[in-house]
Amino acid sequence: MANSIIITLYLLAFSCFALYTPASSNSNQTDLLSLLALKEALNVDPNGALNSWNRTTNFCTWNGVTCGRRHPNRVIAINLYSQGLMGSLSPHIGNLSFLRKINLGNNIFNSRIPQEIGLLRRLEYIEFSNNSFTGRIVPENISQWRNLVYLNLINNNLSGPIPPEIQFLEKLRVLGLGKNKISGLIPHFFGNLTSLRTLYLRSCGFEGEIPQSFSQLEGLSYLNLGENNLIGTIPSAMFNISTIEQFQVDFNDIHGTIPSTIGLNLPNLKLLVLGKNQFSGRVPISLSNVSSLELLVLSVNNFNGIMPRFGGLSKLDSLYAAETLIEDDISFISSLTNCTSLRVLDLGDNPLITGSIPETIANMSTLFDRLGIYGTQIAGRIPAGIGNLIRLTRLQLSYNNLEGPIPLSIGRLFNLRVLNLEDNRITSDAPSAFGNLTFLYSLSLQINNFSGIIPTSLVNCTNMRELDLSRNNFIGPIPREILIPTSYVFLNLSYNELTGSIPVEVGSLTKVEVLDFSNNRLSGLVPNSLGRCNSLEWLHLEGNLFEGQIPQELGSLRGLINLDLSRNNLSRTIPIFFSELHLQKLNLSFNMLQGKVPITGVFKNKTAISLEGNKNLCGGIFELNFPPCSSSSISSKNNLSTLIKVVIPIVGVAAILCLIIILYKRRTINTSLSSLPLSAGIPFLRLSYADLLHATNGFSEYNILGRGRFGSVYKGIIDNGHTFLAVKILNLFVKGASKSFMAECNALSGIRHKNVVKKLSVCESVDFQGNDFKALIYELKAYGSLDKWLCYNREQEKGQSETQLRYLDIKQRLNIAIDIARAVEYLHCGTNSTIVHGDLKP
């Protein structure tokens, strides 16, 4: 719209003037000095537009300077449009007494418009738009501008009032004062400018009513009064100005009805923009006769009744009729199939529009670019013919009652950028055809009845910035593929039935600002890789089955302002780094957190945090009402008397107890090492992948006991901490791992010996990503690895308790060697078939 305004202004401007040609004769000293003063007043000339402005050449040859034919040594025009110039406009401009045309538009002039410019009685054309001029809208002494035809001051920082002398500019054809800070009432004397063809007063802060005198502007073709604070009605006589082509009064508070004869009285109308007012009544049927109409904006008004059939408007480019009281069947859009130039149709937020989208939508203009039918009462299915609109870039059908599956033909809309089907009754799997929409950057399917798995074909949508699949019935794991496009800014998968863990690939979303996986059945650990999402502001994982501790890597999210991890099974302590982030909301409620609550940062504000439902928390600010944390050490302020009376006796008693314990352990350690009980009473365990994931804290690095050629061994805990396991997870990507698994199962299935660790179970299943999973589960010996007993280091003894000391005498070491020999002998000779083993791990 702005471009059309500028084109209109310039076409009118250049129609007013003959071409000027530069002359190079004897220079006029006054004009020379004035031009040099203009250059001197500028601070910035990034393009070197004024490099030629120096005394070495005739000023009539300078860039942007034109001298006249009749007066070859006098400047008649200056054109420095869009040169990036910054600075002031020198008062010496008033000395260029032959100046007729000056174009300084689209620069950064930031001074007042000098009063001296009012002395230039030959001026015909002034173009100062898109600058930063300040002060009065125009100088007061403009009465000499009798020849002025064109005055454009649009988009500056000028202020009012408008001097009444402007009404005497009888030749003025173009007046642009919009996007300044004028305010007040629109002057009635504008009606005296009977030569006006273009009047642009948009966004000036004008109040009151449109003056009745405007009906005197009988030659007016372009009027823009939009974005002001105008009230009242449009003077009825204005609808009789047959020359009007563009009529814009949008974003005001004007009321009344539009005359039914508007289409007959304004036969040249191209743009009619009435949006965001209080117009009422029916949309005039006569508008369907205005064959020149290109843009019709009726949105956000109180129009009622049915929509006229505009099938005869072959030049119609855009029809906006959102948020009105139009009451019609959506089938009326069938008449628009004859509008062969139509690109945009917006009928959103019209709750009185009913019916089903007609199949004839397939016959819409081949130029059709945007379709919006949202917030209505339309029902039925999306017709397959919509796939014919191959130029569509935006399709918005949200907040309706649409149902049934999405047609596969939607995959032919290769140019689609925005697809919004939010809040309907669509029941189907999300079609893999979405993967064809490679230009898609916003996909909104929330609040429907989609089911099945999330299509992995979304990996092809590499431009995706916003994906919202929330509040549906999607199942299965989060596909790694949908996390591959790194362009996400918004990703919402909440309120579905998703399972499994969050893929580590989530860490590649370095641009994502909002991430919501809440209210699913996701499990495992909160992934450390989330710490790489360094643009994250909102993270919601509440209402899932996450376990383990809150990862320290979240402390890297310096821009995080809203974090919700509530209603999970998270344990351990609250990380202190939360105090260092600029969080505005933190919800950790209903987990299994324990320990001290911090008192700095977000934890100072009770209303900003939620911690209820964690039974083992203590400390924090007084308002949280948690019990105080008990002290674990003696205060350093104890005096010498306390040391003598308390500490020394305690040390003496402890020394006696240590002697007793050492003697006792020397008597019993041999027995405990040679005859530790196997897992007697533990039956063959039936453990699933989920059980092992839970037992090993998500296969945490902290639980690794060792690594081998075919996999790793993890420490596991089941039965509420009463049974300890050694879980060997096979890496099936290593060649021979599956064969090793079967061999080990067969070999160990019949072993029964007190010196060989007992196999408790096996697990052969699939993980939450659908990959094969194989594991061997052994009894975990309570005293750890033998090498830590044999390789005794006296330095390690310092600071350890009596139960941590690992010292073996010569007799115990001999017994251990004999037991290992018995185990090896059993493996070689004590079974039906010889067992070939690799390294031994006593």
Image (spheres, helix red, strand yellow):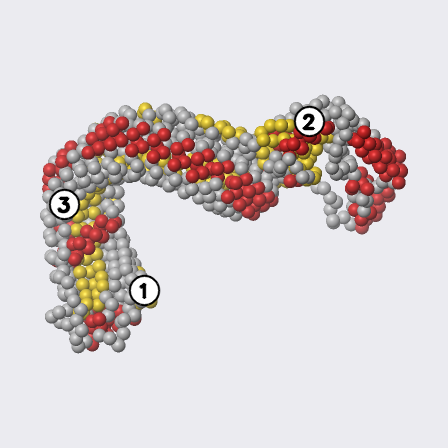
Reading the image, the residue beneath label 2 is 761
Give the labeled residue for mark 1. 47
Judge left or right: residue 489 versus residue 183: right
The spot of residue 169 in percent (x, y) is 13, 58
Using the rendered image of the protein, determine whether residue 588 is visible from the camera's viewpoint: yes
Sequence order check, earlier mark of 3 and 2? 3
Instruction: Indicate the amino acid at tag 2.
Output: Ser
712 relative position to 509: left or right: right
Alpha carbons under labels 3 and 2: distance apart: 88 Å
Answer yes or no: do the residues labelled 2 and 1 have beta carbons within 8 Å?
A: no
**Residue 138 point in image, percent of width and height:** 21, 59
Asked whether residue 489 appears in the rendered view, the answer is: no
- The image shows residue 684 at horizontal and vertical percentages of 70, 23
Disc 1 marks which amino acid?
Asn
Residue at the image position 47 percent from the left and 32 percent from the top: 494
Label 2: element kind:
strand
Q: Residues within 10 Å of mark 3 (few under 14, many from 20)?
A: many
Residue 779, percent from left and from top: 73, 30
Q: Secondary structure at mark 1?
A: loop
Left-right relation of 500 to 678? left
Residue at 79% over, 31% down: 828
- Residue 155 is drawn in which quadrant? bottom left
Residue where numbered disc 3 is placed: 244
Camera-near label (3 vs 2) is: 2
Mark sitting earlier along the chain (2/1):
1
Q: Nearer the viewer, mark 3 or mark 1?
A: 1
Instruction: Indicate which disc residue 103 carries.
Output: none
In the displayed structure, 217 sits above or below 20; it is above
**Real-space Cα distance between discs 2 and 1?**
79 Å
